[in-house]
Image (tube, rainbow, N blue to C red):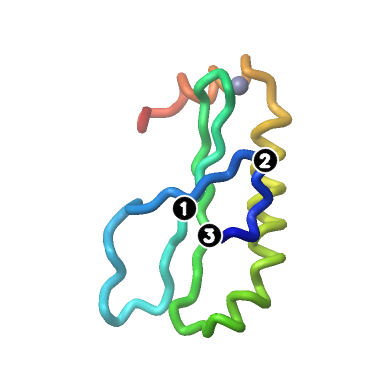
Amino acid sequence: MAALPGDIGIRNVPGMGSEPAPDATTRDVHFAVSCDCGASVLLGIEVSLNKTAADITAVMPTIVSVLSDQAKDFQAKTCQEHTLMRMGSTTG
Ligand SMILES: [Zn+2]
């Protein structure tokens, strides 16, 4: 995931959820974007475990693009909106 641009503040979130079942074909990978005000949002991508490294490399630009768009969406909001998002969240 080193391909993610560092300047938008996306970080990988290891250990989210449980390990995939032995026969699972996909796995959710989670990323978090946070703001200086303390608000943060989780972004999720489903990755096929059947893909080879070359396959993953091929789709990385798409994944990065999707995550970047979602991160920019979040960062485009004001901190007032971030606060409302935090208040509306029950997961704290
Ligand atoms: Zn904020």
Q: Earlier in the sequence, mark 2 or mark 1?
A: 2
Q: Does 86 appear above or below 6?
A: above
Kind of residue at badge 1: His
- The image's mark for residue 30 is 1
Q: Does 15 appear above or below 85?
A: below
Image coordinates of residue 83 in percent, x first then y, are 54, 18
Name the residue tied to disc 3.
45
Ligand 1 is within 8 Å of the C-beta of the residue at disc 2: no
Determine whether the residue tagged by mark 1 lies in a helix, strand or loop. strand
Task: Tell me the residue at 48%/23% (across/down).
Answer: 86
Label 1, label 3: how far apart the Cα atoms are: 6 Å
Kind of residue at badge 2: Ile
Q: Nearer the viewer, mark 2 or mark 1?
A: 2
Q: Earlier in the sequence, mark 1 or mark 3?
A: 1
Q: Earlier in the sequence, mark 3 or mark 2?
A: 2
Q: Does 79 appear above or below 32?
A: above
Task: Tell me the residue at 47%/24% (across/down).
Answer: 88
Query: Which image quarter: residue 20?
Result: bottom left
User: Looking at the image, in which quadrant does ligand 1 appear?
Assistant: top right
Label 3, label 2: how far apart the Cα atoms are: 17 Å
Name the residue tied to disc 2.
8
Label 2, label 1: how far apart the Cα atoms are: 15 Å
Quarter in which the N terminus is drawn: bottom right
Task: Tell me the residue at 43%/48% (across/down).
Answer: 13
Asked whether the residues under the numbered discs 1 and 3 touch, taking CB atoms below 8 Å apart as contact, a structural biologist would say yes
